[in-house]
C-alpha cells in the first residue's frame, strides 16, 4: 500500500516549531497566543480575545448554532518565590512542574528587562549525603551567577517573575515530535490545521465554528471555564494529551494500554457525551482513521470537564494525543497521531448537523 501524503505542510511545520519554542507559561500566554492567532487569521472570519488571554477564531460568526474545537495554550513553569541574601533563588510551581527533572537544567527568568539566564544548581555527586539525593521543592534552587540578593534584583529579578525552560523543538527518527509543552500546544496546532483544511478545501459548515485556544488549563481548567461562558456553545470537541503507557516504569493495569502511533485516543467518562462520542467514532470508522480508547473516572482532568458542565450542560467529547514523558522538557508525540487527530476533528465537524440535538431521548 502506498504511503499517504502528509497533510501537514512545510509552512505548518515551521509554525509549529516557532509556536513550541516560544514560552507560554500559565498566566503569561500572550506572546504564544499572538503567534497562534496570526497563523489562523487567513482561515477565519472573525476573532476575539477575552480578559485573561483565551483566543477564539470564528468561522460563520452570525450562525446561532455554535461548535467549539478547543485546546489549551499554557505550559507549566515556575515562579520566583524567595531570594536568599547570597543570591540563590527558590521557586514555587506554576502548574504541575516536575521538580525531579529540575537539577542541572537551564532556565529563562522572564523580567521586564528581558530574559535572565540561570541554572538549577545541584551539589556534585561527590558531596551529597544519602538523604539529599532526591530533589524536592525544599532543596532545588536557581543560580544566575550572582553573589547577593541585591545583584539578583539589579538584573530585574523579583518575587513573582516567571521561569521557563528554553528546550526547543526537534524531530526524532523523522516521525516523533519532541518539545516541552506539547501538552497541549500540539492541540492548538491541530485545531489551527483543521481551520486551514476547512478553508483550503472550501468546506462550508452549516454552523458557527469557534476555534478556541484557552489559557490556564494547567492550574485548574480556568481559561476554559471563562471562555465556555462567553461562547455558550452547543457542542465542544476538546483536544488534550494522554499518556503513552508503552515505555518503561508505567503500569498498564493502572494507566491503560495506549501507544504512540496507533492513533488519537477517545475517552469514555461521565463528562463525555455518549451520542457525540458515537458521532466521532462513526467519523473515524467511515474514513478508516485509527483510534484508541481510554476510560476516565470521575473526571477527565481536561478542559472537557469545564465545557461539559457549563451553560446547563454542553455535549462534549475529548480527543487526546498519546504523549511520552509528559510534563518534562522532552515530551514526545508521534507525527501520525497528530495527523490523524487533525483528520478526526475535520471529519467529525462535517458530520454535525446544524441545530443537532444530542440528548439521549426527547
Image (spheres, helix red, strand yellow):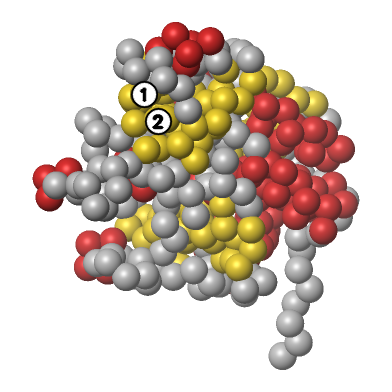
The secondary element bearing badge 2 is classed as strand
For the C terminus, give its image quadrant: top left
Q: Is residue 280 left or right of residue 258?
A: right
Which quadrant of the view contains residue 212?
top right
Q: Secondary structure at mark 1?
A: strand
Which residue: 41% across, 20% down?
A: 147
CA distance for labels 1 and 2 = 6 Å
- Is 265 located above or below residue 187 in the figure? below
Which residue position is annotated with label 1? 88
Q: Residues within 10 Å of mark 1 (few under 14, many from 20)?
A: many
Which quarter of the image is occupied by the N terminus? Answer: bottom right
Q: Earlier in the sequence, mark 1 or mark 2?
A: 1
Q: Is residue 147 above or below residue 261?
A: above
Q: Which residue is mark 2?
A: 142
Tell me, for residue 36, which label it has, or none: none
Q: Is residue 67 visible?
A: no
Q: Is residue 281 above or below residue 187?
A: below
Give me the residue at 24% from left, 52% from top.
Answer: 126
Q: Position of residue 166 (x, y in %)?
A: 57, 41
Hey, which residue is sitting farthest bottom in the picture? 1
Cβ–Cβ below 8 Å for labels 1 and 2? Answer: yes
Q: Is residue 232 left or right of residue 268?
A: right
Residue farthest along the left direction in this orientation: 131
Q: Nearer the viewer, residue 279 or 334?
A: 334
Determine whether, in the image, residue 346 is placed left or right of residue 259.
right
Amino acid at each position: 500500500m502506498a504511503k499517504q501524503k502528509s497533510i501537514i505542510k512545510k509552512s505548518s511545520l515551521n509554525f509549529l516549531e516557532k509556536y513550541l519554542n516560544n514560552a507560554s507559561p500559565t498566566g503569561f500566554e500572550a506572546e504564544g497566543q499572538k503567534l497562534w492567532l496570526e497563523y489562523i487569521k487567513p482561515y477565519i472570519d472573525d476573532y476575539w480575545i477575552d480578559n485573561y488571554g483565551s483566543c477564539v477564531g470564528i468561522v460563520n460568526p452570525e450562525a446561532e448554532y455554535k461548535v467549539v474545537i478547543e485546546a489549551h495554550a499554557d505550559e507549566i513553569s515556575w515562579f520566583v518565590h524567595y531570594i536568599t541574601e547570597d543570591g540563590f533563588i527558590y521557586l514555587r510551581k506554576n502548574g504541575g512542574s516536575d521538580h525531579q527533572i529540575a537539577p542541572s537544567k537551564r532556565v529563562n527568568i522572564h523580567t521586564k528587562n528581558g530574559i535572565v539566564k540561570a541554572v538549577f544548581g545541584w551539589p556534585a555527586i561527590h558531596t551529597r549525603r544519602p538523604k539529599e539525593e532526591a530533589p524536592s521543592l525544599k532543596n532545588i534552587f536557581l543560580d544566575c551567577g550572582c553573589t547577593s540578593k541585591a545583584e539578583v534584583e539589579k538584573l530585574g529579578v523579583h518575587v513573582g517573575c516567571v521561569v521557563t525552560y528554553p528546550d526547543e523543538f526537534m524531530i526524532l527518527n523523522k516521525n516523533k515530535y519532541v518539545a516541552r509543552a506539547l501538552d497541549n500546544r500540539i492541540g492548538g496546532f491541530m485545531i489551527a490545521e483543521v481551520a486551514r483544511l476547512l478553508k483550503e478545501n472550501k468546506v462550508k459548515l452549516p454552523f458557527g465554528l469557534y476555534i478556541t485556544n484557552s489559557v490556564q488549563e494547567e492550574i485548574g481548567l480556568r481559561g476554559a471555564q471563562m471562555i465556555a461562558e462567553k461562547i455558550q456553545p452547543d457542542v465542544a470537541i476538546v483536544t488534550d494529551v494522554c499518556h503513552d503507557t508503552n515505555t518503561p516504569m508505567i503500569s498498564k493495569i493502572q494507566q491503560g494500554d495506549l501507544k504512540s502511533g496507533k492513533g488519537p485516543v477517545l475517552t469514555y467518562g461521565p463528562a463525555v457525551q455518549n451520542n457525540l462520542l458515537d458521532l466521532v467514532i462513526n467519523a473515524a470508522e467511515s474514513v478508516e482513521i485509527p483510534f484508541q480508547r481510554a476510560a476516565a473516572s470521575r473526571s477527565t482532568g481536561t478542559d472537557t470537564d469545564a465545557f461539559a458542565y457549563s451553560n446547563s450542560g454542553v455535549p462534549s467529547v475529548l480527543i487526546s494525543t498519546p504523549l511520552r514523558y509528559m510534563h518534562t522538557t522532552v515530551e514526545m508525540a508521534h507525527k501520525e497521531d497528530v495527523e490523524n487527530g487533525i483528520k478526526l476533528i475535520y471529519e467529525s465537524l462535517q458530520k454535525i448537523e446544524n441545530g443537532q440535538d444530542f440528548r439521549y431521548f426527547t
